[in-house]
Amino acid sequence: MGTFSIWHWLIVGAIVLILFGGRGKVSELMGDVAKGIRSFRKGLSDDEAKPVDPPKNDGAKS
């Protein structure tokens, strides 16, 4: 176990379970963050996929 005692490993394990385990609020929050990043990337790729049409000039002066 190196320089850490069993108590250190139990505390680290408990923190990992709280952050990433089960249906805790933190794991749901991280899932929501991932969904937000995914939709942001999708929005960026949608903007790049659409060609930008230049404004039409009908010859009239304003």
Image: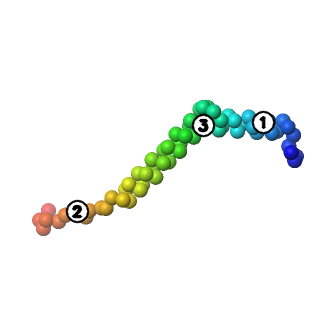
Q: Answer left or right for 30 relative to 52.
A: right
Q: How far apart are the two marked residues, 1 and 3, measured between alpha carbons?
A: 18 Å
Residue 27 disc label: 3
Residue 11 disc label: 1
- Depicted 46 relative to depicted 9: above or below: below
| Badge 1: residue crowd in 10 Å (few <14, some 14–19, many ≥20) | few
Q: Earlier in the sequence, mark 2 or mark 3?
A: 3
Nearer to us: label 2 or label 1 = 1
Q: Residue at x 60, y 31 (%)?
A: 23
Question: Could you tell me which quadrant the C terminus lies in?
Answer: bottom left
Q: Residue at x 65, y 35 (%)?
A: 21
How many numbered discs, if any? 3
Numbered disc 2: secondary structure = loop
Q: Answer left or right for 55 relative to 60.
A: right
Numbered disc 3: secondary structure = helix
Residue 33 at x, y = what percent?
A: 53, 42
Q: Earlier in the sequence, mark 1 or mark 3?
A: 1
User: Mark 1–mark 3 contact, CB under 8 Å?
Assistant: no
Numbered disc 1: secondary structure = helix
